[in-house]
Image (spheres, rainbow, N blue to C red):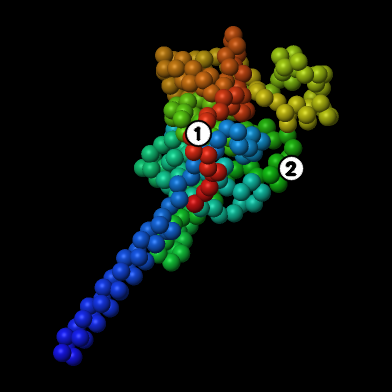
Amino acid sequence: MKSMKGKVIRDIRNQEAKRKQLQKEVFNQRYNATKEAKFIDKEDINMNSFRAIPKSVIQELGLSKAALAVYPVLCCEADFEKDEAFQISQKNIARFAGVSENSVRNALKELENAGLLTKEKVTDGPRHFYVYKVTFYRRPELEANEQRGDAIYFYNCIIDNGIWAELKPRAKVLYLTLRAVAKQDLELYSVIEGENYGGDWNGVNYDDYIRNRKWDVCDISLSKLCKLVKIERTNLTPILEELERYKLIERVGEWTKVYLKPGRLLRHKTLTSKIAY
């Protein structure tokens, strides 16, 4: 009788131990899982946050389309003030960049080899993940050199609202290239926008123009533009049309207005603030 009673007690304890182990696994799965970042609804998006991306990254390094899709995502996730490590999953990078996770892995290696990215593996209990540091012009550098002509101000809202993910890879490259080659033209801008900047490239008028301008102007030929982005002339029109749909550009005769911020934002059914894990 005692033997039977002991067996029942052992069985009950074993069942309880299994139940607790299962519960632990379920909790670990839930709370250690990668959290999925969401896009931000157009009514709640911050239109003024930006990152200063060196033009050389776009024009001189010969990066792939995937690397140029991923790089702005990493810059927008990083702190603008200090060069500090940050965490974001490859799944979320892929989501914001609009590319596959395999493309993300290749892009990260490419950016590392180009000296634009460093990563470190971190172990936190059962979790293993990478933290990253990415190179771009941060606020202290911009304030030390007010007129930094070798950078474009890439606005976070393009990524936060999901537009960057929606654009095809060649459209992303074309937009970055247009931003890099477009010029500031205070006189033309004053005439088109009806602003009284007075054509003065010094003083308050210029500072106000730089801070508040909506677009720059690109006057290079389409054939030259095709060579810069390495696409056939016959393939250029649909890419330009794609950028026009989001009002990132506007073709006007022989030249193109290149907008710093999108004129058309997306509306998302689920309104969730962007988070980085």
The mark nearer the N terminus, 2 or 1, is 2
Work out which residue is located at the far bottom of the displayed protein and give it: 2
Relative height, residue 46 to residue 220 (above, below): below
In percent of width and height, residue 224 lies at 52, 17
Task: Give the secondary structure at mark 1.
Answer: loop
Q: Is residue 67 visible?
A: no
Question: Residue placed at 43% from the left, 41% from the top?
Answer: 94
Please name the residue that numbered disc 1 is placed on: 268
Question: Residue placed at 41% from the left, 14% from the top?
Answer: 234
Q: Mark 2: few, some, or many residues within 10 Å (few <14, many ≥20)?
A: few
Relative height, residue 274 to residue 224 (above, below): below
The amino acid beneath tag 2 is: Glu
Q: Is residue 251 left or right of residue 96?
A: right
Question: Residue placed at 42% from the left, 61% from the top?
Answer: 127
Nearer-the-camera pick, 269 or 221 = 269
Relative height, residue 263 to residue 33 (above, below): above
Please name the residue that numbered disc 2 is placed on: 143
The residues tagged by marks 2 and 1 sit, at their Cα atoms, a distance apart of 36 Å
Q: Answer yes or no: do the residues labelled 2 and 1 have beta carbons within 8 Å? A: no
Q: Mark 1: few, some, or many residues within 10 Å (few <14, many ≥20)?
A: some
Q: Is residue 114 left or right of residue 101?
A: right
Question: Residue placed at 52% from the left, 29% from the top?
Answer: 266
